[in-house]
Amino acid sequence: MNTPERYTITSALPYTNGPIHIGHLAGVYIPADIYARYLRITGNDVAFICGSDEHGAAIPMRAKKEGVSPQVIIDKYHFMIKKSFEDFGITFDNYSRTSAPIHHKTASEFFKELYQNDKFVEETSAQLYDSEAEQFLADRFVIGTCPKCSFEEAYGDQCENCGTSLNATDLINPKSTISGAKPVLKETKHWYLPLDQYEDFLKEWILVGHKKDWKTNVYGQIKSWIDDGLRPRAVTRDLDWGIPVPLDHAEGKVLYVWFDAPIGYISSTKEWAEREGKDWEPYWKDQHTKLVHFIGKDNIVFHCIIFPSMLKAEGSYILPENVPANEFLNLEGNKLSTSKNWAVWLHEYLEDFPGQQDVLRYVLTANAPETKDNDFTWKDFQDRNNNELVGNFGNFINRVVVLTHKYYQGIVPEPAELSEVDQKTLAELRAYPAVISSSIEKYRFREASQELLNVSRLGNKYLADEEPWKLIKTDPERIQTVMYIALQIAAAVAVLSEPFLPFTSEKLKDILNLSDRPAASLRTDLVKLTWNDIEKEQALLKSGYQIEKGSLLFSKIEDLDIQKQLDKLAATKKANEVATKEIIPQKETISFEDFTKLDIRIGTIMEAEKMPKAKRLMVLKVDTGVNVRTIVSGIAEHFSAEEIIGKQVTVLINLAPRKLRGVESEGMILMTEDIEGKLVFLNPDQIEVNPGVTVN
């Protein structure tokens, strides 16, 4: 990139109903941060904008669940999320919140501007209403079956299974999440943005103008929506949480969160500009500014159809240059879920792996769900760290720094005449900035991260081929050149790694004295390199320049660390299974006389063997006190024959005989499941009794 440009970069506003997890990071925030950091270090004017989305229906739902006010919820998670982003190194120029006065003012003014210019249509329609809770059911207050994929737990605004954007009235068999009641239809008045009036504009702008440069997953979803025919979309809701509709005749109504939330990008930019003494308007209204939205695939419709239609209706705003949405990230083979606690939470990761932000940044970038859903596993996390960061990147830097201090007391040596190998290596090095730039500018961050690793691979191969540790005694002049070349590669790595591994880049710059704030020096002659310097035929570190002693950039992650994380997930899985285990409804009431007909006794298992060709069945000989009888029981998956011989069990002995796989069973062993789902006997093991004792 040669000519500096102005960029407004936004990343999806996270809901303040829970912490940030790795799915959010991989899908939105890491790629956005890589892009913003890259643009800054290549000399561009960047406003990287985000903030908390605090008006979604999920907020009051969480508040009801925890028995607190929505304000308590948004304050708790806003500050948690903001701190997590800061600690993780996400470099927002401004992180705001939609409860801020500047946002309420901006969103209200935006609505009034469209209202006064007749951009809305006013309609009275039948909406879902919970008669028990006396409340209209919008968005997350209603669940039902998705009409697109038949997923039975779709929300009223979106199906989290297939990603389809929905209206609550689209759901099949809807149910209120407040009372559990089946909602009824009740008429209410709302204002709608007539998306059908913007079809031609959207077709021309996206389907024609961005067919080649937008990601296929984004383009495909937009085309599907437009091909189905766009319909008016409500911009208001019947709720008591949100920004009040700024009209005198709209009591009890608020702006729909998907109208107010994207305006949060604008209000956050205003907040930033006011603080920095800048003019916000060029970042949103200058046609030379490039607007880029980083989102997940579940937000494509809102950022590519609804928000652009809002901007077009207003008339003075620029439209997005690109919307590089990612797919979803799964965790250990299962979908990430906030409600089920199936996630790797950012704030917990930062506690469990202190100082290792870049490891997670790298793994989530190298395994990013850019074109399809991908899976995060702790084993892959460990392998990538140990093999790629420690074994490749860290190994190269450690070799260079240690050998430079061992041979030259940390001073960059004077090279002799460069060999053909030296010249070829430097030529390859100078090509990497353009290669990495090309990948980043095409939003291929996974590809870009691997090109960065190729730079350190270039250095490792060069050292392995030249073997300075062997030649230092026989050809010291040659080794001066080898170490000089290796140091040039190390300097390039320090600069090129900054968008991807910012904490590591800063450490390496400190070691090489390239940093603005060197760790161990007060020197004034420090070198400051730029991205473009690497492409030039000049020394990045000149002969005679002093570097500092180094420390390991990465450390191995041990099996014990990974097992702790797997154990945590296993505990979560068990808790979810217990929580979701269906309680069998009470059976039909019986009389006391019916109960007295049951003859339940204590018996002792005398013999046991697994039934051939039957996975679950075991044939038992049980001494019931009355006689020894054969009982077939489905316990073979839980017990071995050997461990239950001699065990006392509770037996229903007057059950009518029944043949199972040709064996007549003359009773039933009474059992239940423990909290982990394992079968356990109903027996008095603590007190030994004689077979035949009745259970009353």
Image (cartoon, rainbow, N blue to C red):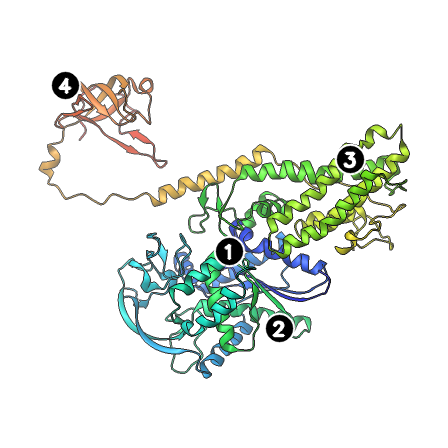
Q: Is residue 483 above or below residue 503?
A: above
The residue where tag 2 is placed is: 287
In the rendered structure, the answer to whether residue 292 lies left or right of residue 671 reads right
Label 4, label 2: how many angstroms apart (C-alpha)? Answer: 93 Å
**Left or right placement of residue 38 versus residue 121 in this view:** right
Mark 2 vs mark 3: which is more N-terminal? 2
Q: Residues within 10 Å of mark 2 (few under 14, many from 20)?
A: few
Residue 216 disc label: 1
Per the model, the C-alpha gap separating discs 4 and 3 is: 85 Å
List the residue tagged with mark 4: 626
Q: Quadrant of residue 683?
A: top left
Amino acid type for the residue under numbered disc 1: Thr
Relative vertical location of residue 413 with respect to residue 219 in this rendering, above or below: above
Give how far across and how far down residue 524 sits, in percent: 87, 55
Mark 2 or mark 1: which comes first in sequence? 1
Residue 261, given in percent of the width and then of the height, sits at: 49, 67
